[in-house]
Image: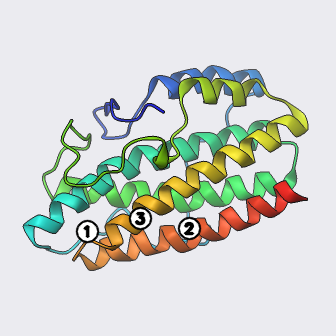
Amino acid sequence: MRHRHIRTTSTGLVLTAGGLALTAILAACGGASSGSSTDGAGGHSGMTGSSAASAAPTGSRAGDVAFAQQMIPHHQQAVEMADLALTCAQSPQIKTLATAIKKAQDPEIATMTDWLTRWKAPLAMSGDMGGMDMGGSGTGMMSDTDMASLGAARGAAFDKMWLAMMVAHHTGAVAMAQQVLAATKDAQVKALADAIVKGQTAEIATMQQILAG
C-alpha cells in the first residue's frame, strides 16, 4: 500500500493520485456527492477545526505531529470511499454508514489540520516517521488500484468490496489511534484518538455484521 509519498495542496489537504482517479470513477457512477460535510460527527467526534491541542512535552509532541500528519490523509481517503459509496452503493445500510463516516471524519480532519498549523509543523510527513511506526499495510490505506477496482464494481459486488475495504481501513485507523494513546501526554490528542478507537470499532462491528448477513 502506498502512503508515505503523500503531498499536500496549499490548503493543507492531501490530494493523491488516487483522489484524481476517484473523480473519474465517481463521474462514471453518476457523479460525486456534494463536498465534504462539516456537520456534527456521526457518532465518534464532537471536536471542531477550532480546537487546539494543549501544550505537551517535546518528546510526546513529535508523536502527536506524526499521528496528525498520517491520520489526515487516512481520513481523507475514508471520506473519498464514503463519497463513492453514496453514489454507487446498492445497500441503504452502506449509504447510512458512508454518511456517518463523512460527518465524523471531516471535522476530525479540520481539527488535526488546525493542530499542525498551531504547532507550526508541516502538514505533510517527511521521511522521518517522528518516532511512530505507522507505515506499511497495517494502516489500511488503499492503493490507486484498489480504488479503481472499487469504482469499477457494481451492485452487490460493490457493496461487498466496499465493506471489506472499509473494515481494513478502519482497522488501520484504530491501530494508529491506539498507538498515539499509549504515547501522548496531550489531553485533546487523547480525546480525538479515543473517539476514533470507539467510533470506528463500532463501525467495524456493524460492517462485519452486514458482511456476515
> Which numbered marker is on residue 15?
none
Circles 3, 2 touching at the beta carbon (< 8 Å): no
Q: Is residue 207 left or right of residue 55?
A: right
Q: Amino acid at mark 1?
A: Ala
Q: Amino acid at mark 3?
A: Ala
Task: Kindly report the distance in space between the C-alpha atoms of the residues bearing marks 3 and 1.
Answer: 18 Å
View extreme (left): residue? 58
* Mark 3 vs mark 2: in front: 3
Which residue carries the number 2 mark? 41
The residue located at (8%, 66%) in the rendering is 58
Mark carried by residue 52: 1
Residue 202 percent coordinates (x, y): 65, 71
CA separation, marks 3 and 2?
A: 17 Å
Q: Which mark is residue 177?
A: 3
Who's the residue at 16% across and 58% down the image? Answer: 62
Residue 192 in sight in this render: yes
> In the image, which is nearer the foreground, mark 3 or mark 1?
3
The mark nearer the N terminus, 3 or 2, is 2
